[in-house]
Image (cartoon, rainbow, N blue to C red):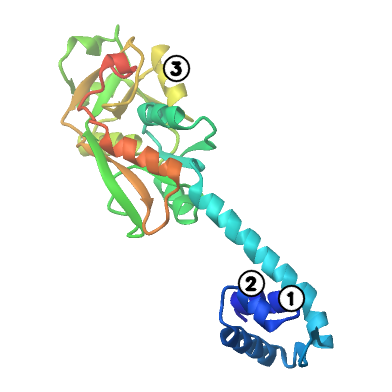
Amino acid sequence: MEMNQIRYFLAVAKELHFTRAAAACNVSQPALTKAIKKLEEELGGSLFLRERATTQLTELGRLTLPPLERAWSAAWEAKKQAETFQRRASSPLRIGIELSIASQLLRPALNAISRHCDDVDLSLSQDGQAEICAAMLAGELDVAMLVEAGTLSDRLHRWPLFNERYVIAFPCDHPFAKHESIDVHQLQAECLLMLRRADCPARQALLSLLKQNDVRPRREHLVGNQEQLIELMLASLGVCVAGEQMPLPASVAIRPLTPEPGPRRIMLVVAAGRPIGPTPGIFIKQMRSRAWPQRVAPDEGMMP
């Protein structure tokens, strides 16, 4: 059953005249008659009694008229909603951020979106890479910032944003401030602050570096999020490894590690082949067009 068949049937039922119904539908009468006959074949009986001067609904026609009216009304409403959806100026923006990537890096793009539209439905989720990728493939996230990994699914499309080093971060009054770089063996006497999640890229990079150099720190403190990590560091309870562009307070200093754990690449990721709404589209454009520096300037609220 095709929608045009329903449309022509409803027109004839209203006009009770095939010629006038064809004119109302802007179609030739033979085409309308052919469509009605095909509908009658599908429904198993005649829908109209045609006499020389009059056209009347049959009992089957009267029976099928209400459900076909509802079907046409529902289809029309669906079409209108689809057209409104396509014309919308904004859409929900659901962003996933991998552990150890600072959400503050989104600020310029979110500022641009707020200037464009003030009624955006925004949600931010920070989680491990596996969980973020699963949520994206399930349609629960629109876009994500991830650390590049060889395990990313081929069903995800990605754009590189920037590369950064892992650095050691510590309070400015820490003895490390006297050095231009920190040898990994100097961590032997330190308390290390790390996220509790074992799949945190910064934690994995640090533990790998310590193992390669047979270094065992004096103590470890595990925390639930980056805010807690910074608070413990400001309380002089330890030092931590972070991405070079992680926003840190002015009272925190950073130094490169020797040997370096290796750079990491931050990627912008979406589900391949999936339509992107207006607001995620603006966000992606802003993130990709930004001139990402090797170091974020202090006046942007980033690291000193």
Secondary structure category for the residue under label 2: helix
Which residue position is annotated with label 3?
Answer: 231
Q: Which disc is residue 15 wearing?
A: 1
Picture layout, residue 170 above or below residue 81 = above
Instruction: Using residue 215 as the reference point, say whether residue 181 is left or right of it.
Output: left
Tell me which corner region of the image, top left, top right, bottom left or bottom right, holds residue 231.
top left
Measured from the top left, where is residue 85 in percent x and y? 53, 51
Q: Quadrant of residue 172?
A: top left
Front position in the image: 128 or 80 = 80
Above or below: residue 17 compared with residue 265: below
Q: Nearer the viewer, residue 129 or 19?
A: 19
* Disc 3 secondary structure class: helix
In this rendering, is residue 227 above or below 174? Answer: below
Kindly identify the residue that appears in the image at 25 percent across and 43 percent down.
160
Badge 3 or badge 2: first in the primary sequence:
2
Q: Are marks 2 and 1 in contact (CB under 8 Å)?
A: yes
Nearest to N terminus: mark 2 or mark 1: 1
- Residue 102 seen in the current view: no
Mark 2: few/some/many CA within 10 Å (<14, 14-19, 20+): few
At x 30%, y 20%, the residue is: 169
Q: Residue furthest right?
A: 59
3D distance between C-alphas at marks 3 and 2: 73 Å
* Residue type indicated by callout 3: Glu
Residue 275: x percent and y percent? 42, 55
